[in-house]
Amino acid sequence: MPDPAARDAAEEASAFSHPAVAPDASAAYGAHPDQLVDFYAPRDGREHAPLVVALHGGAWRAPYDRQHLTPFVDFLARRGFAVASVEYRRGSDIPRQGATGPVAGRWPETFDDVAAALDAVADLAAEHLPQADPRRLVLTGHSAGGHLALWAAARHVLPAGSPWRLPAPPALRGVVALAPIAHFERAVELNVCGGATTELLGGDAEFAARAALADPAVLLPTGIATTVVQGRDDIVVPAAVAEAYVDAAAKAGETVGFTLLEDVGHFPLIDPAADACAVVAEEIAQLAW
């Protein structure tokens, strides 16, 4: 049996070995330098292509930006999708006092940005990516980006008074969340990404109140078609986190699709060289077409 850490390192190296792919266009959805969307046109030249909005992972931490997701985004474009890759504000490069790594996320800016980007993306696509059909919009995201995709689809379930709350469900065909940090309580129990979930919400003192506004597992049911794709051998965001989210959805009366891939870890889901990436594209296609 291969060493799990060695396997994870090899899978990460493969996913990160592809050169970055430049977008066909970029647009700002706000004044901050991180408030950007990159657009990728379908490589087959088709018109009225489904629009996939992609949110990158990286534990909501500053060193990880959208560049590492560009090979995956280009893979989707080569499958005939129009793609919008969203950047958003992440945590500081400087560790919080007592922390061992960069702080994860900013409260409330990370959530401000994702909400603003999703509210603006249809209009921005109409201007910068006319091949896209925003009426066929699917959200996807990997790891921390999977969390943000699930959260963005649940904004209409947020408590009254939340600045991010939508009055009605967003106009989505669905969500395909890839190894998402989708259940905060379970993620904290497993110390996912070195305590990133607690850092995202500002620490233990703020956790309970802010989790009510940020944890996809408590913002259920959404009424939005949702699929989770997860590698069984993932040691970065273990399958137990996704399973807890799927169970929470079932208890809330909602069925969430769950595709559990054998002999797959965290990174093959966004690695164009891996079979798992093709599975992801098929899951997106089932919602989009």
Image (spheres, grey):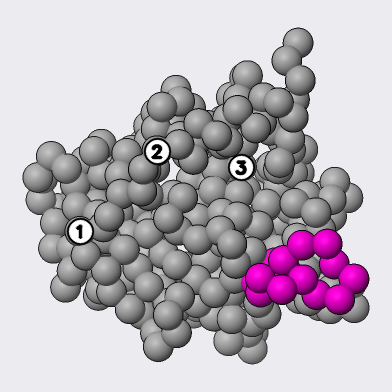
Closer to the camera in the image, 18 or 215 = 18
Tell me what residue is drawn at x 60 percent, y 49 percent: 143
Amino acid type at mark 1: Asp
Q: Quadrant of residue 243?
A: top right
Q: Is residue 166 above or below residue 228?
A: below
Report crowding for label 2: few under 14, some 14 to 19, many 20 or more residues within 10 A (C-alpha).
some
| Disc 3 to disc 2: CB gap under 8 Å | no
Q: Quadrant of the C terminus?
A: top left
Q: Position of residue 142 (x, y in %)?
A: 54, 48
Report crowding for label 3: few under 14, some 14 to 19, many 20 or more residues within 10 A (C-alpha).
many
Q: Is residue 55 visible?
A: no
Q: What residue did someone put label 1 on?
A: 24
Q: Quadrant of the N terminus?
A: top right
Query: Residue 182 vs residue 244: left or right?
Result: left
How far apart, in angstroms, are the residues tagged by discs 1 and 2?
18 Å
Q: What residue did someone put label 3 on?
A: 179
- Magenta residue span: 91-104
Considering only order in the chain, which callout, 2 or 1, is on the residue closer to the N terminus? 2
Closer to the camera in the image, 266 or 258 = 266
Tell me what residue is drawn at x 76 percent, y 20 percent: 3
Q: Position of residue 217 (x, y in %)?
A: 71, 56
Q: Main secondary structure of the magenta part?
A: loop
Q: Is residue 244 above or below residue 22?
A: above
Amino acid type at mark 3: Ala
Tell me what residue is drawn at x 18 percent, y 69 percent: 128
Report crowding for label 1: few under 14, some 14 to 19, many 20 or more residues within 10 A (C-alpha).
few
Regarding mark 3 in the picture, which secondary structure is present there?
loop
